[in-house]
Amino acid sequence: MAKEVIRQYLPLLEEEGRGAATDDDVGRDRHYLPDVPDEDPYQAGHRTCAGCGPAIEYRWVLKAAGQDTVMAGPTGCMYVANSTYLCTPYTVPWAHTPIASGGSFTSGMAAGYEAMIRKGRHPGPYPNIIVMAGDGSAADIGLGSISGALYRNHDALFICYDNECYANTGIQVSPTTPYAGMTTFTPFGKAKPEGTSLPPKNLAKMMAAGHPHCYVATTTVGYPVDLMNKTRKGLNHRGAAFMHCFTPCQKGWVYQTSMTVEIGRRVVEAGLFPVWEYDPADRTYHYFHPPVQRPVTDYLAMQGRFGHMLPEHIASIQAQANRNWQDIGMDVPAELREGEDPAKHLRLREETYSMPLNRGVGA
Ligand SMILES: Cc1ncc(C[n+]2csc(CCOP(=O)(O)OP(=O)(O)O)c2C)c(N)n1
Ligand code: SF4
Ligand SMILES: [Mg+2]
């Protein structure tokens, strides 16, 4: 007789954690400094760059998921830097998949575990099944296979760690590279002074709109508790879940290595990466309203990949941020409205705290 497939439940972490005890008076730290679980299925032993955002995200996702987890990783930095022969940071089973096949591989794992548990060949309970794909894989080369897995509703969590470029092969443009973000395939110059000229693909909204039965969420490395709770909600959800995580890439974006988490918060406070959750039960979006709203230059000037930007480029990004504020139901302060006027801006490299120009990192 077929055995029952038992699902696990991961309790959510306290959002008011230790962050509430800091002297932060505007509440920026509310989702920060969590009482994180002690276990660390993603250990020392990887070879990512100092300050690598995806490595931080991997560690927190696996802390949230715990030891009863199986992982897959399509080709990208987090496969290459994490899996030198005989040396890996994982203490959970992990497999590398071709860059196009993260979704299909994970579908197979999920269906395989269901069948093995039913037939009594695996003792159960059903494990946490996670695939973490880069933006080049999830938003581009492997998009079809992830969409197929979401549509078929396999019980697994599909995560895109988004460093807004094909990092591992030398920082090439990907569909999530932001407007004016310089990459080795979109250098700035006379013909295209802005560098990347297209707006980024809105991957998470595509996934939610296209697969309305799935749990879908966005988060960043700026909000560890939010990131870990959404990981747990995605795993607790019976069926397919998708999480899009903003993860700065120190090498490709050119910033001070200690600033990864701060950049993960500023992108939200600048209105450039809305953090939200889509609930398939009532088919609604729930938006996070950050306690601080800041001009986009507070975010852009920290990164050398934007150092070439001219006033009209900055004004155009501010206009996009202002549209985002309205979309998530927040008012646009007058100061940010004024930022839509190019005359209000300097060239980015003339901002007092801007990073040096990036003239071809990774090349
Ligand atoms: C079909 C295929 N095309 C190209 C490559 C070369 N390749 C290896 S890693 C990589 C970058 C992947 O980018 P992303 O998924 O964003 O991960 P990241 O390196 O940024 O972490 C590419 C293009 C490949 N492995 N397979
Ligand atoms: S290139 Fe970027 S994503 Fe890759 S290991 Fe370095 S910081 Fe991390
Ligand atoms: Mg990438």
Image (tube, rainbow, N blue to C red):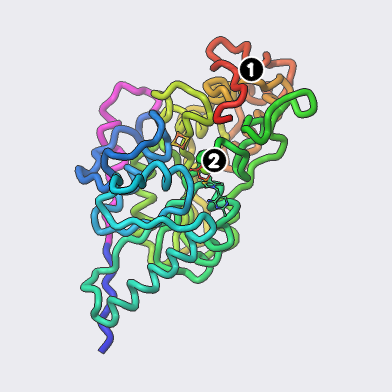
Please report the residue visible at 40 percent of the width from the left and 67 percent of the height from the top.
155
Residues at marks 2 and 1, CA–CA distance in whole angstroms: 27 Å
Name the residue at the right extreme: 191
Q: Which range of residues does the magenta coloring cover?
A: 9-27
Q: Give the main secondary structure, helix, strand or loop, of the magenta stretch.
A: loop
- Label 2 beta carbon within 8 A of ligand 1: yes
> Does the magenta-highlighted stretch encompass residue 21?
yes
Quick one: 185 or 317, which is closer to the camera? 185
Q: Which mark is residue 67?
A: none
| Disc on the earlier residue, 2 or 1 | 2
Q: Residues within 10 Å of mark 2 (few under 14, many from 20)?
A: few
Residue 66 locus on image (x, y percent): 26, 52
Please report the residue visible at 59 percent of the width from the left and 54 percent of the height from the top.
141
Q: Residues within 10 Å of mark 1 (few under 14, many from 20)?
A: many
- Label 1 beta carbon within 8 A of ligand 2: no
Please report the residue visible at 36 percent of the width from the left and 36 percent of the height from the top.
47
Q: Is residue 292 visible?
A: yes
- Residue occupied by mark 2: 169
Quick one: 223 or 140, which is closer to the camera? 140
Q: Which is in the foreground here, disc 2 or disc 1?
A: 2
- Residue occupied by mark 1: 348
| In the displayed structure image, the side of residue 297 where residue 269 appears, left or right | left
